[in-house]
Image (cartoon, rainbow, N blue to C red):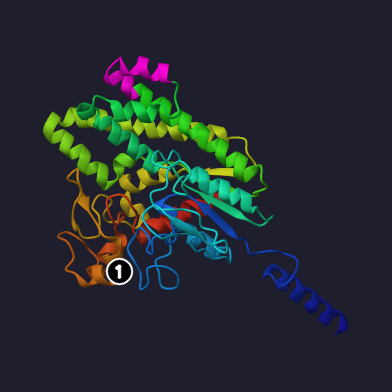
Amino acid sequence: MKHMRWIAAAAASILLAACGGGSIDIVHPVKVAGDSLADSGTFGYKFTVQGTARTGTGSTPIWPEIIASENFSSLCPHYVATSVSTFNANDKCTNYAIGGGRINNLKDPTSPVSITQQLKAMGAAGFDKNDIVLIDGGGNDAADLIKAFLAAAGDKGASFAAMLTTVLDPATVQTLLAQGQTGMAQAGGLYMQALATQFAGTIKTNAVDKGAPRVVVLNVPDVTLTPQFGFVLAAIAQQQGPEAAAQLKQVFGGWVQAFNTTLGASFKDSKTVGVVDFDGTLKAMVAKPADFGLTNTATPACPVVGQDSSGLPEYDFPTCTAAALSAQTPPVGATGGANWWKTWLFSDSFHPTPRGHELMADAVRKLL
């Protein structure tokens, strides 16, 4: 009987250790850098359909928060906006991501809206042996590049050239732009490759070399699959014909692929950094929505509230709530009754719904 009690006690101690009561650590603090896809509420809301609260308890869990919760950790915004462009830092919070974040933040390179600056701040704070670092970025950079390319007809390529020369040799840019649209397309690809190399170097210097034990980076999804660029390409098709729109879609998708190939190669042999193929995941969702429990991957769920300066639809996240969507009459063709929006992929024209965030978390979870 004494022997049996000893076995039971030993088993209990092992179970306790496995549950965090002994020497096995199961709490993994999560640290985040990125853009609106990963922002926990810098501006007082999240860039998705809002829950019963905009931030904190009751708010919609976004993908890094789902991962944090599963690792017995929690997230709150490190930066709190006091205006559109000024922020206070909260050192108790470890989600450095800010809506509008860019790798190459042209307007203010030293602002924390720069993902480079976010990573520098995170690295300066240091890492623990149990930390998980989650990073996303590049989607807004790709969108900026596309918009500058499309504006070339109006500004004779000035904004496109200015953007390119922030990471490429000016002489190379000048030579390529002199070749017309073919050279412009090639220059865009070189820009995205250089940006990925720069991004990888920033991650290595400020996370890996500073002791971050596990780093997960999402690659860039093909932004032409978002409703925003669906609207843009549809307008081009109407003005210039379907063939022109298809060609541009291929060019823009090629730029994203150039970034992702370079980013993946940068960490191919890393034992610390893993790259999640968010691009491949989004393409799979669009190709076979039912496989992911989706019924709509093209239309934003949030209501349109106006138009921006370029004529694209505008949305208001603070008023796009789960309760409001469930209370409205479902759009024509939508299924699921009041829960119709729960199987849609996009909340507005560029950001995922809560279901979209769950699917992003799935992709990260598999890699972890």
Is 176 in the magenta? yes
Q: Nearer the viewer, residue 295 or 155?
A: 155
- Above/below status of 7 relative to 294: below
Find residue 166 and report its horizontal and vertical position in percent: 43, 29
Q: Quadrant of residue 315?
A: bottom left
Residue 221 seen: no
Residue named by callout 1: 322
Q: Nearer the viewer, residue 167 or 34?
A: 167
Q: Residue 193 vs residue 27: left or right?
A: left
Kind of residue at badge 1: Ala
Find residue 160 and report its horizontal and vertical position in percent: 32, 29
Find residue 9 and report its horizontal and vertical position in percent: 79, 78
Q: Quadrant of the N terminus?
A: bottom right
Residue 294 seen: yes
Q: Nearer the viewer, residue 295 or 257?
A: 257
Specify start and end residues of the magenta stretch as a single range: 170-185
Secondary element at tag 1: helix
Is 332 in the magenta? no
Residue drawn 43% across the image and 56% down it: 39
Find residue 133 and report its horizontal and vertical position in percent: 57, 52
Q: Residue 133 vs residue 222: left or right?
A: right
Residue drawn 37% across the image and 58% down it: 83
Q: Residue 247 vs residue 7: left or right?
A: left
Q: Quadrant of residue 253?
A: top left
Dot 1 surroundings within 10 Å: few (below 14), some, or many (20 or more)?
Answer: many
Specify the principal SS of the magenta part.
helix
- Above/below status of 324 relative to 162: below
Residue drawn 32% across the image and 22% down it: 184
